[in-house]
Image: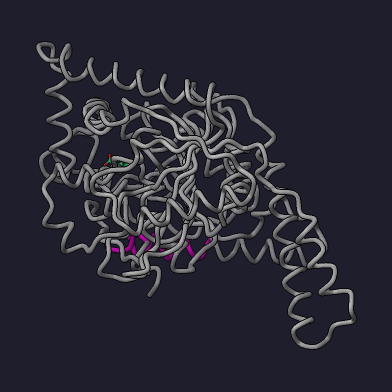
């Protein structure tokens, strides 16, 4: 029942059952190994994970939510998925998405819609809405998504889970069905930052099959190990406090926990957290504003220094993003023709995809390319420079909301104009233009409507280790 609302189903019942069967077999093997006392391959050994329907998996249909690819059986596996499987993770299902990743509410794909487990009337966010829902509804601990302009972070915010977008080039795109190649990043949905660090440490690193990837940085795995030992410590403390409450106190339990509290060094001492005013929009709701303020206070209490910063070109990010991704999409989607694929382009692509192909082809046409396209490239460069500059001079990470509003009602989303619906991505696309790593973490709920709110912690290129360390302090 739960799977129905997050995983591909319609027309792929048999394949989904088979994949689940294979997964069970692998999981049993991993259990048996453990019983025999064999060491685990990794922390993900035997852990069931879900994968967005745009990552190639050998022998499986992978459709990217498109009718055009509804019969696309893959002959190879995406690098990041292969790495996870080599580490013992068990892929048991494929999650529903917006067609080719184009959308913010998981409504554009052939297997859509996805149901937001918080409340079925709310937008689940998109395009990795299915992956977020698989984690939020408790089906699995880890789901893989992709983030071109916010597709991992937005559904994480709308569903109250953690969504991690690594730096561009940190994780291989090999086997990820292309949307806009200079933006596409494999990403991760989890319940907490620790699980994200564990998963990222396994997925990341140079891949000869993706020339944009960089050499491995072992610090992510040390952060993962640190967070694991901290969560075990918290668990022990929790157990001990339980004993104390139960009257099973031998005198040392409560003492040791209170003294450790006062002795605790401030974990974020020396960390400079930048607050860019441009991320405050006219549409920002009071609940989002309150969560932002509270997160700033929480950071301060943990010892961080708060620094107001300015990124003036960020207000141009949204139009520049849409010009560039449509241009790249129109060129990427050219490969799908009637001859090799099952459907004609007219019938095989949905409305939103066709709209973007046309607009991309228009801005790339020889008479036009000097206009919007070249301009958008310049804006992209300017935004990247501004980020670089504030990270060099003023701060170590940035703290901003993921969305100006809590998850909207679907019925309201359906009434929105195209421009209004693109505006949903205003706070996630600046990082995508600059290729920066960014993680959305749940930071409380709106007092008026109970919906979760997500905050993004963003770091300089390839500083995921520090970013996750800082983000975990907000949990
Ligand atoms: N909503 C944005 C778009 O449609 C982002 C999508 C994504 O990150 N895949 O382009």
Question: In the rendered image of this protein, does residue 307 appear above or below residue 155?
Answer: above
Task: Examine the structure image and report whether residue 11 is included in the region drawn in magenta.
Answer: yes
- The span shown in magenta is 7-22
Q: Residue 82 at what x, y percent from top left?
A: 55, 42
Asked whether 360 or 109 is in front, the reply is 360
- Residue at the bottom extreme, as displayed: 247
Q: Quadrant of residue 328?
A: top left
Q: Position of residue 316 (x, y in %)?
A: 25, 28
The answer, for residue 94, to whether it is visible in the render is no
373 within the magenta span: no
Q: How is the image coloured?
A: one colour
Given residues 248 and 222, the one toward you in this image is 248
Q: Is residue 329 left or right of residue 186?
A: left
Quick check: can you spot residue 145? yes
Q: Quadrant of residue 244?
A: bottom right
**Looking at this view, is 370 or 95 the one in front?**
370
Residue at left 42%, top 56%?
A: 291
Q: Nearer the viewer, residue 359 or 445?
A: 445
Q: Quadrant of ligand 1?
A: top left
Q: Residue at x 16, y 60 (%)?
A: 412
């Amino acid at each position: 029942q739960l799977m129905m609302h997050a995983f591909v189903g319609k027309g792929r019942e048999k394949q989904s059952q088979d994949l689940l069967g294979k997964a069970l077999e692998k999981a049993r093997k991993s259990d048996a190994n453990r019983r025999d006392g064999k060491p685990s391959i990794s922390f993900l050994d035997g852990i069931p994970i879900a994968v967005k329907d745009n990552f190639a998996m050998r022998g499986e249909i992978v459709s990217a939510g498109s009718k055009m690819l509804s019969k696309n059986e893959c002959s190879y596996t995406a690098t990041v998925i292969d790495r996870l499987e080599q580490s013992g993770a068990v892929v048991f299902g494929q999650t529903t998405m917006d067609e080719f990743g184009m959308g913010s509410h998981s409504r554009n794909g052939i297997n859509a819609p996805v149901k937001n487990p918080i409340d079925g009337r709310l937008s689940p966010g998109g395009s990795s809405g299915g992956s977020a829902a698989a984690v939020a509804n408790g089906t699995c601990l880890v789901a893989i998504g992709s983030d071109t302009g916010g597709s991992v972070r937005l559904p994480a915010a709308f569903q109250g889970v953690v969504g991690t977008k690594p730096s561009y080039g940190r994780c291989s795109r090999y086997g990820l069905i292309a949307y806009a190649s200079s933006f596409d990043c494999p990403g991760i949905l989890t319940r907490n930052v620790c699980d994200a660090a564990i998963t990222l440490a396994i997925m990341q690193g140079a891949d000869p099959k993706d020339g944009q990837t960089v050499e491995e940085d072992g610090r992510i795995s040390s952060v993962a190990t640190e967070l694991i030992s901290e969560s075990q410590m918290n668990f022990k403390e929790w157990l001990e406090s339980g004993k104390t409450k139960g009257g099973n106190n031998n005198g040392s339990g409560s003492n040791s926990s209170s003294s450790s509290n006062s002795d605790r060094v401030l974990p974020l001492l020396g960390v400079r957290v930048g607050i860019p005013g441009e991320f405050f929009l006219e549409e920002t709701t009071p609940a989002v504003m309150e969560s932002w303020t509270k997160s700033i206070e929480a950071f301060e209490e943990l010892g961080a220094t708060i620094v107001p910063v300015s990124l003036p070109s960020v207000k141009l990010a949204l139009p520049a993003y849409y010009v560039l991704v449509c241009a790249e999409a129109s060129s990427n989607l050219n490969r799908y023709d009637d001859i090799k694929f099952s459907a004609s382009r007219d019938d095989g692509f949905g409305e939103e995809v066709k709209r973007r192909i046309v607009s991309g082809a228009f801005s790339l046409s020889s008479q036009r390319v000097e206009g919007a396209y070249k301009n958008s490239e310049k804006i992209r460069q300017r935004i990247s420079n501004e980020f670089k500059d504030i990270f060099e001079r003023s701060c170590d990470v940035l703290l901003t909301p993921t969305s100006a509003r809590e998850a909207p009602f679907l019925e309201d989303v359906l009434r929105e104009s195209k421009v209004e619906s693109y505006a949903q991505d205003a706070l996630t696309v600046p990082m995508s233009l600059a290729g920066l790593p960014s993680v959305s973490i749940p930071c409380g709920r709106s007092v008026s409507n109970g919906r979760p709110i997500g905050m993004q912690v963003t770091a300089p290129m390839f500083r995921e280790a520090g970013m996750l360390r800082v983000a975990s302090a907000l949990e």
